[in-house]
Image (spheres, rainbow, N blue to C red):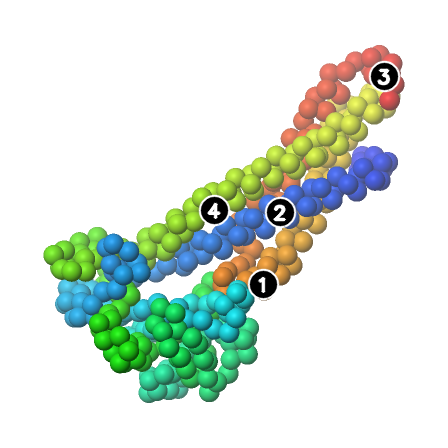
Amino acid sequence: MFIFRLILKNALRHKLRTFLTILGICIAVTAFGFLRTIVTAWSAGVEMSSVTRMITRHKVSFIMPLPKSYREKIQAISDVDLVTYANWFGGLYKDPNDWKNFFPRMAVDPETYFDIYPEFVLSEKELLDFRKERNACIVGNKLAKEHGFKIGDIISMDGDIYPGKWDFVVRGIYKGKDETWDETQMLFQWDYLNERIAQQQPTRQGNVGWYVLRVKDQNAMPIVAREVDELFSNSRAGTKTETEKEFQQSFVSMSSAIITSLEAISYIIIGIILLILANTIAMAARERTREYAVLKTLGFSSIHIVGLIAGESLLLAGLGGALGLALTFPISAGFAKLFPTFFPIFNVEDITIILAVSVALFAGIIAATFPTSATLRTKIADGLRQIG
């Protein structure tokens, strides 16, 4: 207790310096936690991928369509349990320059899509109403709260990929199976899209964007991928079949340079924390060289001296780290509110909390190492002659 009181008195001896040190560590830990949250949020789709789902897309590019007739042939493969399909719609909702108006809009097969994706939680009535009405749509709970969508509302959009004025009636609001599922999507019937396209651009009808396969055994995935791609190897639209996780990773890899840069910056911040704290502790130890010599003369052991220096370092690191971690949560929540659909899952994960705490404590220990070593090596006579 006596040593702790000395540590506290030492820390408060230069209040401004102590405050600025804690503030610097706080800002650095907040930045570290926030950047790590961006990195984990960017990869959230990869982490929540199913181990029994596969994606079949055009082998040249994801944006190129596949014939709907492929479905029956894929379904006939023995290890395939169920096949559904989807198509990216795009469209412009209200002001396209506002990030809040950008959210995934997809045409899906109403009969099978929700069987393959049980993560979409809907009431039986909502699902039936969605299937009965051609221009019906289902929106995520988070999206509905953001835009005030209610059952029966009409959502109007201007087409970009598919020109024209499009009206959708909200017939269901889904919730995610758990907090890791994206609740910002809008899903509507593929038949509605295909019928409109058949009238306006007949050459584009009968195509889907990609197929989703549910396999009976995840160990059979390599075999399924090979069989599907061999089926269409000589067709006008060759395919590439991969696991859902690989498919999601291909999107993340498009921005790998950004993610790598953010990760690099987060580790540079660790160095900044260390430099801030090391500078403060080194200054304090140098100023108190004479005092430590007096303590040695009075019988204080090396353990006491180590405790004083390391204790002050850990106290500053702990306070700065705790404040920085506390600020990470509201800042992350505010950022998620600004970009609700661009980052549909933006939570500070447990691993980020552990890393932030570990970084602060590690910095506290390392920062105290060199001043402690120098103080212990200083002889009492030399220390007593030290001025300032």
The answer to whether residue 304 shows anywhere in this view is no
Point 63% across, 53% down: residue: 328
Which residue matches tag 2?
31
Question: Would you say the residues marked 1 and 4 are in contact, meaning their CB atoms lie under 8 Å apart?
Answer: no
Which residue matches tag 4?
259
Which amino acid, mark 2?
A: Ala
State which tag comes first along the sequence, 3 or 2. Answer: 2
Marks 2 and 4 sit apart, C-alpha to C-alpha, by: 15 Å
Which amino acid, mark 4?
A: Ile
Secondary structure state at the residue bearing disc 4: helix
| Residue 51 higher or lower than 153, as above or below | above
Q: Position of residue 377 (x, y in %)?
A: 73, 16
The answer to whether residue 349 shows anywhere in this view is yes
Q: Nearer the viewer, mark 3 or mark 2?
A: 2
Q: Nearer the viewer, mark 3 or mark 4?
A: 4
In the rendered view, does 42 fall on the left or right side of 205? right
Which amino acid, mark 3?
A: Gln
Mark 4: few, some, or many residues within 10 Å (few <14, many ≥20)?
Answer: many
Q: Which mark is residue 338?
A: 1
State which tag comes first along the sequence, 1 or 4. Answer: 4
Which amino acid, mark 1?
A: Leu
Query: For residue 112, which quarter of the picture?
Result: bottom left
State which tag comes first along the sequence, 3 or 1. Answer: 1
State which tag comes first along the sequence, 3 or 4. Answer: 4
Secondary structure state at the residue bearing disc 3: loop
Q: Nearer the viewer, residue 64 or 312?
A: 64
Q: Nearer the viewer, residue 187 or 96?
A: 96
Which residue matches tag 3?
386
Secondary structure state at the residue bearing disc 2: helix
Marks 1 and 4 sit apart, C-alpha to C-alpha, by: 20 Å
